[in-house]
Image (cartoon, rainbow, N blue to C red):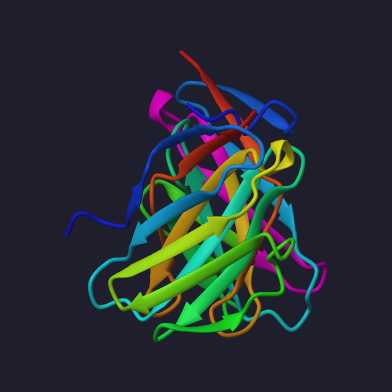
Amino acid sequence: DAGVIQSPRHEVTEMGQEVTLRCKPISGHNSLFWYRQTMMRGLELLIYFNNNVPIDDSGMPEDRFSAKMPNASFSTLKIQPSEPRDSAVYFCASTLSNEQFFGPGTRLTVL
Amino acid sequence: GESVGLHLPTLSVQEGDNSIINCAYSNSASDYFIWYKQESGKGPQFIIDIRSNMDKRQGQRVTVLLNKTVKHLSLQIAATQPGDSAVYFCAENLANNRLAFGKGNQVVVIP
């Protein structure tokens, strides 16, 4: 298995633009998590899905952030409109039990 | 790669020596804990876990100790190698496989 796949690996955009981050979890895993990592705040859970259903989105910072999981093999995190303070590394992780497997992350820079 | 350690506590250790990384957790009801390792430019990677009914668990060159009385977790790395240079995070399992991550500790191995 290739592990959790995220795209793009790097994204540079201008303030106000829409950004879509993509994740393909490990096949067979039934839970998917989106995290944001910054130097100031560390690793923060944004939202997680269980069997494609959003369970807890209390970590989503604002209505500008939205996430979907249309099927078991794909999820998106969208920011619209993006702001400079959204600049961070965004990780997707998936799990079948307790151990979460992380993807390589998407480094987002909003100018 | 992504810089996540500039403001983190840093442990500098000579190659071949043992490393000890400490972590305090907040929820006395947490029953499962994990240590993750994050190398520059990569996502966190599982190292070892421990359940609350145990005080100690050993893996390959790593040992995790759990002190529930003071809500303290430690990771010991034996015979530290250059490849062990990374940021190490402890995480506690909250509910529904949600993890709360600590701030992280940077380990720098001096050859």
Seen from the viewer's position, the closer of residues B47 and A107 is A107
| Residue at the image position 44 percent from the left and 62 percent from the top | A76
On the image, which quarter does residue A56 sit in?
Answer: bottom right
Residue farthest front in this picture: A16
Q: Is residue B79 visible?
A: no
Q: Nearer the viewer, residue B6 or B46?
A: B6
Residue B27 lies left or right of residue B101; in this view the side is right
Residue A16, magenta (yes or no): no
In this view, A106 is above or below B33: above
Give the x, y percent position of residue A64: 68, 59
**Relative to residue A7, is residue A13 drawn left or right?**
right
Q: Residue furthest left?
A: A1
Q: Is B8 in front, or is A61?
A: A61
Find the residue positioned furthest to the top: B111
Q: Examine the rendered structure and indicate whether residue B107 appears above or below residue B71.
A: above
Image: B39 above or below B50:
above
Q: Is residue B78 at all visible to an observer of this figure?
A: yes
Q: Quadrant of residue B72?
A: bottom right
Residue B102: % across, % down: 70, 54
Residue A53 in the image, given as x and y percentages of width and height = 47, 86
Residue A74: x %, y % from top left: 32, 68
| Residue plotted at (45% across, 58% down) | A92
Residue at image point 66% right, 78% down: B94
Magenta residues (range):
B66-87
Q: Would residue B101 appear left or right of B60 to someone viewing this image?
A: right
Q: Residue at x 39, y 29 (%)?
A: B83
Is residue B75 highlighted in magenta?
yes
